Amino acid sequence: MIKYNDAVLSWRTATENNNKGFEVQRSTDGIAFNDLAFVNGAGTSSLMHSYNYTDVKVVSGNNYYRLKQIDNDGRLTYFNIIKLDYSKFAWNILGNPVKDNAIVELQLDKTANVAMKIISVKGAC
């Protein structure tokens, strides 16, 4: 299920020659990229193929993405970098409904001190 703050990346190929697949990469500065996932290619094909990857761990601020296409013989091709700006405040409660423990995940657009007070449905702190 895609959430409002997921990054859905989609791309297509018109033809493929010896294509092992695509390494989806992300960076927060547009310079140092980390591998997120590998998406298998179609090998050699003259048909159009559609691909996608959903990044469910988007960070607050700038997210830079690029594809590294890898041939079966190890040859690499890097594609243009795209930038998505997720400057915002967001939060999630993991483990909902909560029985004993939960994780509260905060996302801010910059480093900040945050105070939280969690109150139960019955009004207890």
Image: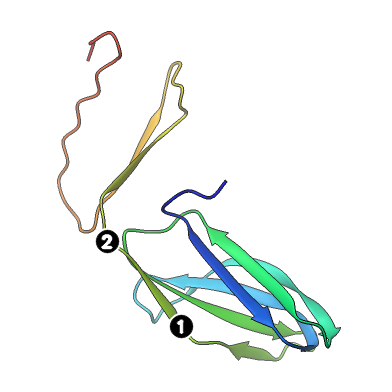
Q: Read off the residue under disc 2.
A: 87
Name the residue rendered at 46%, 83% in the picture: 81
**Residue 20 coordinates in the image, percent (x, y):** 77, 79
- Say which element carries label 1: loop
Name the residue rendered at 16%, 35% in the picture: 115
Give whichever of discs 2 and 1 has the lower sequence position. 1
Quarter of the C terminus within the rendering: top left
Q: Nearer the viewer, residue 15 or 106?
A: 15
Name the residue rendered at 25%, 52% in the picture: 108
Q: Mark 2 and mark 1: span between their CA atoms?
A: 18 Å
- Say which element carries label 2: loop
Q: Amino acid at mark 2?
A: Ser
Q: Nearer the viewer, residue 47 or 55?
A: 47
Residue 40 position (above or below residue 116): below
Horizontal placement of 73 versus 106: left or right?
right
Horizontal placement of 111 versus 77: left or right?
left
**Residue 26 coordinates in the image, percent (x, y):** 47, 70
**Residue 79 coordinates in the image, percent (x, y):** 55, 87
Residue 24 position (above or below residue 80): above
Q: Residues within 10 Å of mark 1 (few under 14, many from 20)?
A: some
Name the residue rendered at 16%, 51% in the picture: 112
Q: Quadrant of residue 72?
A: bottom right
Residue 108 position (above or below residue 28): above
- In the rendered structure, find residue 81 and report the number of the disc placed on it: 1
**Callout 2–callout 1 Cβ contact below 8 Å:** no
Residue 106 in view, yes or no: no
